[in-house]
């Protein structure tokens, strides 16, 4: 009997491994197909005329990154950055923030999408020609060079366009053959793009013809109009020295200019790395987690230094971090990322007060937002412990509208996904073909085998599986007028009874027992059991709060959020 059970268990394990292989193979095939399709699309649309959008200093349009192993790291990244903004990319490790920064720098190739820097199409520009300065996490200082040598090295090896003069001191002028050649290449590419569009995107042809005429007119103008002549030359030594001294004064490190990096502290090394970027007078500063190697106290100090520098230099800065405190205190706007997707873009106060989904709500803010699972019906949210919150008529209408809209959107997305699910559709064709043949045992076995494969190939697509489950749940929610939601409220919006500092609507009293009271000097983080969850409240330390004591709390409902438990999107 034991042997039979053991054999049965082994067979189950074998079947599971077999099914996992089918799923893994199907997923790999899907990734390869998406990668090839994206490469084909980019090859065609690279010939299209590239015009930077007005009003943007840096523009990232539908940026995607897929590595050679067909794994996608960044999905359809769109962002318009204005001059002098301080943009922070924030998210956990592996979310794609550093990869996006490296694509802007030119250290990673863009698989598909368009990047513009100061009005110039930058996809194919070499990193040295993008006029950017980058500060790395590891400082990347040369140990054998002095501070002065490290700061000046980039300037010493770099050549800059320099206006040329004749013997009489007048600027030299000539026909710009290089620009004419570039425009002729653009004209040729646009003609090829026009041919491609004749079959699939014919509506673009009038616009392409207009662009062709404009480029042709520019070429004819440049052929007869001389322009100033520039030649790439190294900067004079006195100019380099002056820039290094100015940067050293700004960063207060002039006294360290003759020291080697090994004689400096972590904070001083980071200042040198910043100085190396400052002397470039670059259009854009890119910073990849520059403070992560510093201790907590020094990080706070360097945060203010970087903000002061940004304002003083009137720079345009893109800063990458996983630290939400850095993002909140430094950014003009924050880009929150997760798993390669943008979750939300907005000013720090907007991100904090109006998170787009559960990920943003929990990632931004310390301590994190309290999240409590419940069911909402007719505007009343009820928890398992029978505690109820009446959110009113408006909540009832918004909730129903949200689920109806999402249901229609998901149904449409599911249809489109199924129509373009090549691997699944090929298997269905095989099954349908076999069903037209003779109905014998071999055909039946073949059909069963392919149907089994079809089941697991379909399951391999996580988005399709999610859509199927979501549609079933949403239809049930709407039918029963009862919706699974997550109630969110930040610790600072929870007060002791009769001590609420708000004009907003308050909840009924919550009677709880203090599990933990963390004293932070001016306030407590009080942990209370609620519906088998840990409810955290920020309470002013005007009295001693002891563990195990009873406490009465109220919630500021004007600051509460309701999220869909299925998609994690915000409802209200």
Image (tube, helix red, strand yellow):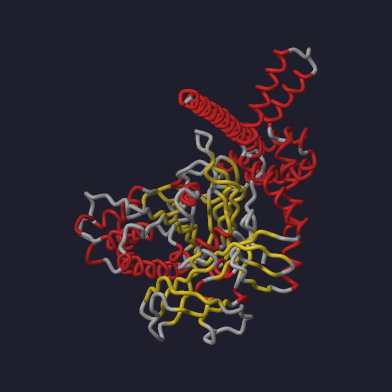
Q: Residue furthest front?
A: 1
Q: From this viewpoint, is residue 283 visible? A: no
Say which quarter of the image contains residue 111.
Answer: top right
* Camera-side residue of 442 and 277: 442
| Count of numbered labels shown in the rendering | 0
Relative to residue 134, is residue 14 depicted above or below?
above
Where in the figure is residue 312, as x and y percent of width and height?
Answer: 43, 70
* Camera-side residue of 444 and 189: 444
The residue sitting at 66% across, 44% down in the picture is: 49
Relative to residue 292, is residue 157 depicted above or below?
above
Q: Is residue 568 left or right of residue 7?
A: right
Where in the figure is residue 256, as x and y percent of width and height?
Answer: 22, 63
Where in the figure is residue 508, as x and y percent of width and height?
Answer: 61, 79
Q: From this viewpoint, is residue 291 visible? A: yes
* Camera-side residue of 306 and 320: 320
Where in the figure is residue 250, as x and y percent of width and height?
Answer: 34, 69
The residue sitting at 23% across, 51% down in the picture is: 145
Q: Is residue 516 left or right of residue 294?
A: right
Q: Is residue 33 left or right of residue 173?
A: right
Say which quarter of the image contains residue 18.
Answer: top right
Relative to residue 472, is residue 438 depicted above or below?
above
The residue sitting at 54% across, 59% down in the picture is: 335
* Camera-side residue of 161 and 289: 289
User: Dividing the image into 4 quarters, which one contains the C terminus?
Assistant: bottom right
């Amino acid at each position: 009997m034991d042997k039979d059970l053991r054999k049965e268990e082994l067979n189950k394990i074998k079947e599971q491994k077999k099914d996992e292989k089918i799923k893994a193979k199907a997923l790999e095939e899907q990734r390869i197909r998406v990668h090839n399709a994206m490469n084909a699309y980019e090859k065609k649309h690279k010939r299209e005329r590239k015009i930077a959008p007005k009003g943007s200093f840096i523009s990232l349009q539908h940026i995607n990154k897929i590595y050679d192993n067909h794994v996608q790291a960044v999905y359809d990244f769109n962002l318009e950055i204005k001059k002098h903004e301080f943009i922070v990319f924030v998210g956990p490790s592996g979310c794609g923030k550093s990869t996006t920064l490296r694509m802007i720098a030119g250290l990673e190739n863009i698989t598909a999408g368009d990047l513009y820097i100061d009005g110039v199409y930058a996809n194919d520009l070499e990193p040295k020609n993008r006029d950017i300065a980058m500060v790395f996490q590891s400082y990347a200082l040369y140990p054998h060079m002095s501070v002065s040598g490290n700061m000046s090295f980039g300037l010493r090896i770099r050549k800059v366009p320099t206006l040329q003069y004749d013997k009489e001191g007048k600027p030299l002028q000539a026909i710009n053959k290089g620009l004419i050649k570039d425009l002729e290449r653009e004209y040729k590419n646009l003609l090829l793009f026009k041919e491609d569009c004749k079959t699939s995107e014919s509506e673009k042809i009038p616009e392409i013809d207009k662009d062709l005429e404009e480029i042709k007119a520019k070429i004819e103008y440049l052929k007869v109009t001389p322009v100033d002549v520039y030649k790439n030359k190294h900067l004079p030594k006195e100019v380099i020295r002056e820039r290094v001294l100015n940067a050293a004064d700004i960063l207060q490190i002039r006294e360290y200019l003759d020291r080697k990096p090994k004689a400096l502290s972590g904070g001083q090394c980071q200042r040198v790395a910043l100085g190396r970027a400052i002397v470039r007078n670059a259009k854009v500063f890119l910073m990849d987690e520059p403070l992560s190697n510093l201790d907590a106290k020094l990080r706070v100090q360097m945060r203010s230094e970087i903000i002061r520098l940004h304002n003083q230099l009137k720079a345009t800065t893109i800063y990458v971090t996983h630290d939400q405190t850095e993002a909140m205190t430094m950014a003009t706007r924050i880009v929150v990322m997760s798993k390669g997707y943008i979750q939300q873009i907005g000013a720090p106060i907007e991100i904090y007060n109006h998170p787009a989904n559960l990920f943003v709500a929990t990632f931004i803010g310390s301590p994190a937002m309290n999240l409590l699972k419940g069911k909402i019906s007719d505007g009343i949210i009820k928890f398992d412990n029978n505690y109820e919150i009446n959110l009113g008529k408006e909540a009832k209408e918004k909730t129903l509208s949200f689920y109806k809209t999402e249901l229609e959107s998901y149904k449409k997305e599911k249809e489109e996904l199924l129509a373009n699910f090549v691997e699944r559709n090929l298997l269905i064709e095989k099954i349908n073909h076999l069903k037209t043949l003779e109905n014998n045992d071999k055909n039946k076995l073949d059909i069963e085998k392919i149907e089994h494969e079809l089941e697991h190939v379909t399951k391999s697509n996580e988005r399709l599986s999610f859509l199927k489950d979501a549609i079933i749940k949403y239809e049930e929610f709407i039918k029963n007028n009862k919706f699974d939601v997550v109630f969110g409220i930040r610790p600072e919006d929870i007060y002791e009874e009769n001590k609420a500092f708000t004009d907003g609507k308050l909840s009924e009293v919550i009677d709880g027992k203090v599990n933990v009271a963390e004293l932070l000097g001016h306030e407590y983080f009080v942990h209370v059991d609620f519906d088998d969850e840990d409810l955290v409240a920020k309470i002013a330390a005007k009295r001693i709060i002891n563990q195990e004591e009873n406490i009465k709390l109220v919630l500021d409902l004007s600051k509460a959020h309701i999220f869909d438990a299925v998609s994690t999107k915000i409802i209200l």
